[in-house]
Image (spheres, rainbow, N blue to C red):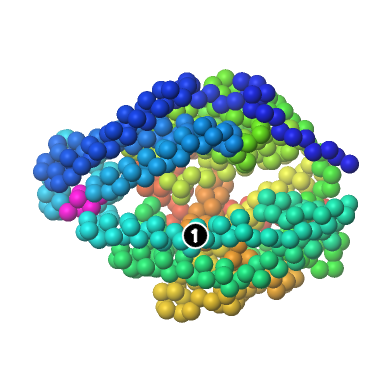
Amino acid sequence: MDVAVEPSNRDRIPEESKWDLSGLYREAAPWRADFTELEAQVSNYEPLRGSLGRSPDALKACLEFDAEVMRKLEALYTFAHLRNDEDKTDNVHQQNYEKVVGLHSRIMQARSFIAAETMEIPEDKMREFLESRELESYRLHLERMLRFRDHILSQKEEALLASASEMGRAAQDAFGMLDNADMDYGTVKDEEGRDVAITHGNLSSLFQKYDRRVRKETFETFYAAYKNHRYTYAALLSGSVKKDLFFSRARNHASTREQALFDENIPVEVYDNLIGAVHDNLEPLRKYFRIRKKILGLDELRIYDCSVPLVEDFKWNLTYEEAVPKILAALEPLGSEYAAVLKEGLLEKRWVDRYENKGKRSGAYSSGCYDSQPFILMNYRDDDINSLYTLAHEAGHSMHSHFSRSHQPYLYADYTIFVAEVASTFNETLITRYLLSQNPDRDMKIYLTCREIDSFRGTLYRQTMFAEFEQIVHAAAKDNQPLTADVFCEQYRKLIELYFGAEVVLDDALSLECFRIPHFYFSFYVYKYATGISAAYALADLVLSGGEDALGKYLDFLKSGGSKYPIDLLKDAGIDMTSPEPIGTALKKFAELVDQLETLTS
């Protein structure tokens, strides 16, 4: 029997395997000094109140001060949250993190007048301001702010909505506590007869067990917990939907969906094209389920059979030092500049905190600020191929951030969520293409092909189904229809029957899945995963077949940050997300992968 190995204490991890935060702060004392200094600056917002409409110089002075404060705050926050994630049990790091979160809240309150007061400047006067030399570099920033003119209320009403927003989090916060802290999902006997407590963390691995009894009992036990609490979950989800409806109406938006898309200036047809294209291409998904059923030798395929690896006992071993050259080789189509910067970051400049240690945050992410390196948190494992993919994925985020911050001023360096997953998913596609080009054996080909299929299935099909569910229930709320447990389950059942077809036998309990998706508490967000993977695959095809011109446009996209709206940035790179074509390209790729899997396993 395997013996569990405890992670090391952080002080036993070699320095070269830890991220180097010295570019922000070498020690805690300078951080505390900057924190105290910034804390004292919060009161300097008040004298600026009421002055923004006096002249371009007055407005510029406020915007400059605000940008300076926010830039300092981001540096303080970045250092504190990275230190806190190194070891969640370190009391000093935790206190510093809580302090900077509190400072962030106070600064947000102090600066809340800026948007409302800017909106109150008469339109003809604002047009003159925007043409002035003093505000030249702030023009796009202000134009984006002014787009909200019809949706920003008086300062008094804005203050009231700001106060209500904390109450508006009640359903989301209650869901989080119920789902992550209070719920008992029961236990299941593993293959060796040992009791295993079911958690969100191990649910995926339990569904990948080759013992079907384990998978079946895990599914039934897990969803029994949701059945026992379905009325509470329905009340929370209904409350969240109605909260969104309240705020969209208060801000004069036609619907909650239009409000969600307005911020990034995304046309509604992007959302509609996504759902329509997926509906037209459900047959390849169903064909994949038929292949999976045949390979697993099952009389009927259940949802708990859809995550089992099709290659049993897949072996993999690759150290971090071996992974980096593979990633660089896979990303060679992105050019020498990209490769040189990434190699230096991953190996020499110590962007990456590589390995697990006691108390370290789980998972992986890319983080940083305008004045720092684009850091990567990893919990790298030599024996898990997903570590290779995760490192390449986070490197995509970090390179996007590096190029954006290197080529854009502070105000325009951040890219939006709509394009955030493009560079990371792009890198993953190149990893798979590279590994398949290395003449792997049949099992490796099957594993890699199936892995990419499942990535598509989870990101493109599944997230689109979620997006469609959101649209249905929010429309029902707008039409004053009741949102009960039965209504939620009935609507979700119709969708899973549509997407899965007759290839998967759908247990009644699967209708309860709608109650366990945390993204539904961040309305109209999930569609961006599907559009992101579609844009990434379309761009990958362009770069790999389009030569230097296509590569140059892609690198310009990475360097553009938030200097344009995301739809326009992608258009400049050669992808029009307002048309169905990029979604169609991704769906065509999915169909090709399914055909390849059929050939490999026939």
Magenta stretch: dominant secondary structure = helix
Mark 1 crowd level (few <14, some 14–19, many ≥20, 10 Å Cα): some
Tell me what residue is drawn at x 43 percent, y 69 percent: 242
Q: Can residue 521 be seen in this view?
A: no
Q: Residue furthest bottom?
A: 481
Residue ID for mark 1: 172
Where's residue 15, x and y in %? 61, 20
Query: In the image shown, does 50 or 391 lie closer to the viewer?
Result: 50
Query: 574 left or right of 263?
Result: right
Location of residue 133 with respect to 199 vertically, above or below: above
Where's residue 105, x and y in %? 37, 45
Kindly identify the amino acid type of the residue bearing the numbered disc 1.
Gln
Q: Is residue 490 visible?
A: yes
Tell me what residue is drawn at x 73 percent, y 56 percent: 198
Query: In the image shown, does 277 or 372 lie closer to the viewer?
Result: 372
Location of residue 234 with respect to 201 vertically, above or below: below
| Label 1 SS | helix
Query: In the image shown, does 278 or 18 lie closer to the viewer?
Result: 18
Tell me what residue is drawn at x 32 percent, y 32 percent: 38
Where's residue 113, x and y in %? 24, 49
Tell me the quarter of the picture where residue 162 sits. Answer: bottom left
Query: 199 left or right of 146?
Result: right
Which residues fall within the magenta stretch?
115-120
